[in-house]
Amino acid sequence: MTTLNNRFEVRKTLGQGAQGTVYLGHDLQLDRPVALKALKPNSGVLGSDEIRLSSRLQHPNIVTLYDAFPGESQPWLVFEFVDGETLAQRLKRDGAMPPVKAVETMIAVLDGVSYAHEHGVLHRDIKPQNIMLDAQNRPRITDFGIAVQRGSEAASQMAGTVGYMAPEMLKNLPVDTQADIFAVGMTLYQCLTGKMAATGESVYAILHRVANEPFVPPSSIQSGIDEKLDHLVMVALFKDPKERYADAAAMATALREWLGTQSGKSEDGSSPGKSTIDFLLRRMRHTEDFPALSQAISAINQINESDTERLQVLSDVVLNDFSLTNKLLRIVNSATYSQFGGTISTISRAIVILGFDTIRNLAITLLLFEHMHNKDQAETLRDATLQSFFGGVLARELGRKSGARDIEETLICGMFNHLGKLLTIYYFHEESVQIDRRVQQGATEQQAAIAVLGLDYAELGIGVTRHWGFPDRIVNSMHALPEGVVKSPQNQMDRLKLYANLSAELLPLLSLPPKGLYRGVAKLADRYGTASGMSERQLAEMLESTRDLFLSHLSDLGIDHRGSDFIRDLRKMGKAATPGEETEADTLDGARLETELAASAQATALLAAGIQDITNTLVSSFKLNDLLRMILETMYRGMGFERVLLCTRDPKSNALVGRFGFGPDISEILPGFSIETGKVNDVFQVALQRNADILIEDIDADSICERVPVWYRRLVPAQTFIVLPLVLDKRVIGMFYADRAKAGSLKIGNDELNLLKTLRNQGLLAIRQKQSGG
């Protein structure tokens, strides 16, 4: 066998094209198959900026260009090897494709073309021979060997394949993205009819017809093509590029709209459910973020046991995402994994110590959680994401407490049991609202989802999970278990399904009153007890310990969950879920539960950690405003306030005015937050005059309502707040203010109040140091 560049072994010929020959090769350094293309001598593309630009294209519908190097007699390109066949081979074997299938294929191609255009790359040779269909029938654009940068001189040079080159290219006119759109249109024409749009007895005849003669519509050659689709194809084939689609995304949108009118008309024998999943997947792929998420998850799933460099590959995937890297390291350094000892500061070390599977599954879980959680959307999405994440942690702990081995994947299985609902809320907001409306009218969630989406949440989640390349054992875990007593698992696939289903059935119980929760746990113990080996008491205790672990995870990740109904229900679960320990005091004293919430170890730890950071800052060189912001941020995160702000004295007006703070609307509130000094009328003035820390639980309470100034009621949407005056040498210099929206929701225990006072005193110490020249 021939070895190239001391690295690539040539094994067999795969095909030949206008620009050169393609071989199956093997990368000896990375031990993986590759596609090697031998370009014709003097091709003029090797080493160009365009080659480097093309190598950076990473998209599910683009075959990655790995490398380029000069050979002894000709230049070579190294591509990702795709196990499949070209679209040209498929058309040659099967003939014209059904319209729905042809359009689906071209939409995927357009997604890849659009991505390349957005990154400044023109392909210039789109044709069936350069579209690979992989093992999942996913179209992959290959051969960016003659691609060029948009706007470059090379862009307008004649290049490509006769029959697919745009008229402007033939006439030496300026060439831009519409040339690739024309080539996609010609390829779609061929998919629909099995024939090229322009044929002739010679190359010159074909070129002349492309440049000058009108094309006949596809329906005149192949039956079953409607007038609307005819029109969409012909728009891409206009001679004048200005009359074509504005860009590849516009063409894809037009084809998707046509596809949406074809419900139930799939001609490849697929089930209606599969057609619906395909349609929903197309809609998701059209969003700007779904392809990136899919690419990251698919890349992780493609790392297999036989990959000798899998530690390096997984590390590279994770390190490409700065936020993912930081959050993953926070988790692996948390108490959950503390038994391994020492601080883990690199992803590579995490893989070595905790194992490849642990880090891979954590990475996938965090990718999905962060992607969904960060969406700037309704609270419904945030709670659904938190529930999904909790479901994953719960499934993992169920497996751990049951003594099962090989439980790493239960985290993904538990989370993905809620994937369909999560995707619907995120990507199909209007449909999600319709589903909720039907549920409120009495339908079950499954009935409502089928009525609106055409399938239930489980089917959607399973379809996307298959699209991402997850193994069958994970996909299988997303199927519901039959009713009745669950049988003991016989293998790993059964175990994953058991823990994912038990987690999913436990989750709705968390919103029930304690008695209802206890009854629900008892029923699930009867259903799953034999299979899981857990009694009702063990299930209840496991729920509580998982609750604490989950809240710890959120703290480790710095997740803001203030105002979440799900987290409120989770915390209220308390000890009432433990059989034999339910008391009237546990269920009736809601105020005490809220106090226990505020006095949680989590809040104390955050405040204490902030105080330590500020102490360390005080003994070094610091900027006063930076340190005061640290104090406000510690208060904000530690206590879960809606907003916090600092007021200081204005020398001109002698009033205390808002300077800076944190909160969703703080920039609108600060300019109007002003307290006159000297008088003793309202609650703020009383606090300042008396140097008293004041907590107002309800601004509308009879005892205080007249003391709350009008300007405050108009400006701040909060009914409970705390004031911590800043008084130095008996002179009021400012104050810390913090609030929450709902009356009575601000309960501060003695420990937390003392820590808040410590923070205030640190602020005073910093101010004194700066006043004395420190």
Image (tube, helix red, strand yellow):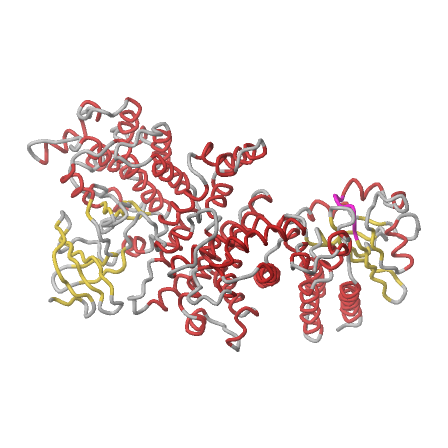
Q: Which residues are magenta?
A: 716-721
Residue 11 vs residue 592, the one in the foreground: 592
Residue located at (57% from left, 32% from top)? 442
Residue 406 vs residue 412, the one in the foreground: 406
Residue located at (12% from left, 31% from top)? 199
The answer to which quarter of the image holds residue 579 is bottom right
The answer to which quarter of the image holds residue 353 is bottom left
Residue located at (19% from left, 70% from top)? 6
Is 514 a magenta residue? no
Quick check: 232 above or below 422?
Answer: above
Residue 481 drawn at (x, y percent): 44, 49
Residue 603 drawn at (x, y percent): 69, 62
Residue 314 vs residue 590, the one in the foreground: 590
Looking at the image, residue 26 sits to the left or right of residue 540; the answer is left
Please state, as top left, top right, bottom left or bottom right, where the C terminus lies in the image: bottom right
In the picture as drawn, the residue positioned furthest to the left comes out as: 201
* Chief secondary structure of the magenta portion: loop
Looking at the image, residue 77 sits to the left or right of residue 58; the answer is left
